[in-house]
Amino acid sequence: MAVELAYQRVLLKLSGEALAQDQGHGINLKVLQQLAEDIKEAYDLGVQIGIVIGGGNIFRGVAASTQGMDRASSDYMGMLATVINSLALQDALEKNQVPTRVQTAIHMAAIAEPYIRRRAIRHLEKNRVVIFAAGTGNPFFTTDTAAALRAMEIGAQVLMKATKVDGIYDSDPKINPEARKFDRISYIEVLNRGLKIMDLTAVSLCMDNKLPILSFDMTVPGNIARAIRGENIGSLVTN
């Protein structure tokens, strides 16, 4: 019996820091394997998946720029870190029999395809997972903004923001035990409250183009598939 899906094409945004887990930096191979298994479970439902992954477990451009490094140079270094993570995720997915393509916004033909929108959509239509690396290819833009941009370019129905928290709260639930979780919240309220689920540029871009954002906990095995089936997890940002 066919499974009813809430979405047919999604863009999954993963943080680089999540790959490091407790070790703080680098790539924790056990975490990477679990993530690949979760994506495989979602892929087997028949959904088309694009992925943007950050590079904060290797290098954070913004952090380096606050310590005196040129912002553009540090951002380019951060983009290269996302390529490392993308190649690691590709390897883990293909070991789970998930066909993938890595496309980079900065050309590096020896290891990945250049980002070409029509080619990316064709890969999705052929049931390949497409991993978008190197952000937007421009400094001063985060991977959150890259995720919003790529989601709209490929016609994704939702931007799935995978985090280490089970949704969006009005304050930090780790600090405030009385923090209230939102099941649904508007873009404007996210912006007005300064809720840091994604950077302001990414949220504004999603609002302007009516792209829903689903924030959920990626550390719970099976949550990606649950979100795609439309189960009530996480927090949804819409109009």
Image (tube, grey):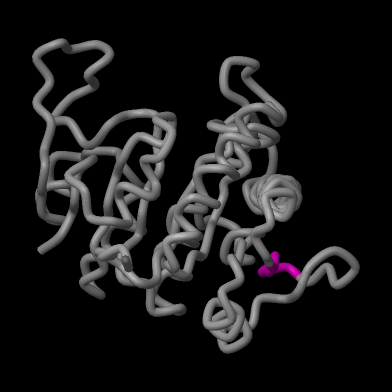
Side (left or right) of 199 relative to 175: right
Quadrant for the N terminus, please: bottom left
Side (left or right) of 72 relative to 155: right
Figure check: 219 above or below 160: above
Figure check: 118 above or below 66: below
Q: What residue occupies the far front of the structure in this picture?
A: 1
Q: Nearer the viewer, residue 207 or 5?
A: 5
- Give the quarter of the image for residue 186: bottom left
Residue at x 66% of width, y 76% of height: 115
Figure check: 123 above or below 129: below
Magenta span main SS: strand
Q: Is residue 102 inside the magenta stretch?
A: yes
Q: Position of residue 54 (x, y in %)?
A: 57, 46
Magenta-tinted stretch: 101-106
Q: What residue occupies the far right of the structure in this picture?
A: 110
Residue at x 83% of width, y 68% of height: 108
Q: Position of residue 230 (x, y in %)?
A: 22, 55
Quadrant for the C terminus, please: bottom left
* Picture mark count: 0
Q: Position of residue 88 (x, y in %)?
A: 74, 46
Side (left or right) of 166 relative to 118: left
- Give the quarter of the image for residue 170: top left
Residue at x 71% of width, y 28% of height: 26
Figure check: 45 above or below 154: above
Q: Is residue 7 inside the magenta stretch?
A: no
Q: Position of residue 119 (x, y in %)?
A: 63, 85
Q: Nearer the viewer, residue 200 or 107?
A: 107
Residue at x 17% of width, y 12% of height: 176
